Amino acid sequence: MKPEQLLKPAPAGLYCPAGDFYIDPVRPVARALITHGHSDHARAGHGAVLATRETLDIMEIRYGEDFCGTSQAAAFGERIDIGGVTVSFHPAGHVLGSAQIAVEKDGLRIVASGDYKRGADPTCAAYEPVPCDVFITEATFGLPVFHHPEPKAEMGKLLTSLKQFPERSHLVGAYSLGKSQRVIRLLRDCGYDAPIYIHGSLARLCDYYVGRGIDLGDLRPATTEKSKPADYRGAVIVGPPSAFEGRWARRFSEPLISFASGWMMVRQRAKQGGVELPLVISDHCDWPELTETIRELAPSQVWVTHGREEALVRWCELAGVPARPLHLVGYEDEGEGEGEGEGD
């Protein structure tokens, strides 16, 4: 069997004809396998959804109980037969519940990695390499210029700013699923034990993370209607970047705007967004991690799904690994608004 017969691009997303299912489809389909809960990968309206328990719970939190017709939870490593095709889910290290999906038939294995990262992150299961014939990788930061710094060093910048400007409220922009919880946990791991205030849109997901055993410390609502700007002097407030563009952010005490994103490496993006304190913290692989992963797996082919496809395809070709771009559409360029290619 040729790889293209097992899994191929289609208008709705990656499609497996033998099993009649899609991976992360961009429109409602009869059967969907979902890698993780970000809304550009996990959409409502499918007939049947197979995903990890956490991803299903996150979809319910975001879309309501009727987000799909039927759902089935897959444990990591569990082998499930769908129409003669074996599928299994493996940790991707992106956000809580995120998974790579291995698709196997007639001795051929394709791994669709979804979004993934290799760095340590106590808020989700760590990425696990899955041997395969074809590796499908994202390329959000698929350019040689992207080398992400150590996250705790970036968090040190925030802690230093808190000491330098104790009179100012530090507003940290972080997307609601994954990034906000990671930022909060990074602060705790760096010794920050004061209350952290959160925008209301983060509450349910933060509660879910805590319910899954992830300690986020003392979290309190940043309810400006019931408080004075002085109440938040010297405090850390975490919220979605979109909230910082309106009246809500201006109510705090001399607000200092920060943003946690891999794209904060690009100074122009920080400047355009009015970000005073950019924090380069990404939930995706940088260029060295992408290339090292491909070297480690040594697949027969690499397919690149979204992001900077051409550069990574070219690197593979120079390394002697056949590669092709899939040109899938409908997946957000990370950090571009609240569409939530949030996993930046």
Image (cartoon, helix red, strand yellow):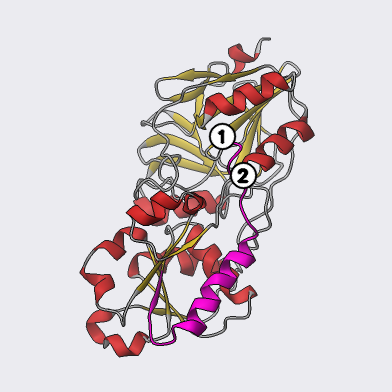
Dot 1: within a 10 Å radius of its alpha carbon, few (fewer than 14), some, or many (20 or more) residues? Answer: many
| Helix, strand or loop for disc 1 | strand
Q: Quadrant of the N terminus?
A: top right
| Helix, strand or loop for disc 2 | loop
Give the residue drawn at x 48%, y 33%: 32
Give the residue drawn at x 38%, y 82%: 168
Magenta extent: 142-171
In the rendered image, residue 60 lying in the magenta stretch gets the answer no
Tell me where residue 46 appears, x and y as whole percent.
39, 35
Tell me where residue 326 appears, x and y as whole percent.
51, 21
104 shown above or below 206: above
In the figure, residue 61 lies in which quadrant? bottom left
Residue located beneath label 2 in the image:
285
Identified by mark 1, the residue type is Glu
Query: Which of 293/33 is in front?
Result: 293
Left or right of residue 206, residue 291 in this image: right
Dot 2: within a 10 Å radius of its alpha carbon, few (fewer than 14), some, or many (20 or more) residues? Answer: many
41 shown above or below 216: above
Residue 8's tag is none
Identified by mark 2, the residue type is Cys
Tell me where residue 144 appears, x and y as whole percent.
61, 37
Residues at circles 1 and 2 in contact by the CB criterion of under 8 Å:
yes
Asked if residue 89 can be seen in this view, the reply is: no
Residue located beneath label 1 in the image:
138
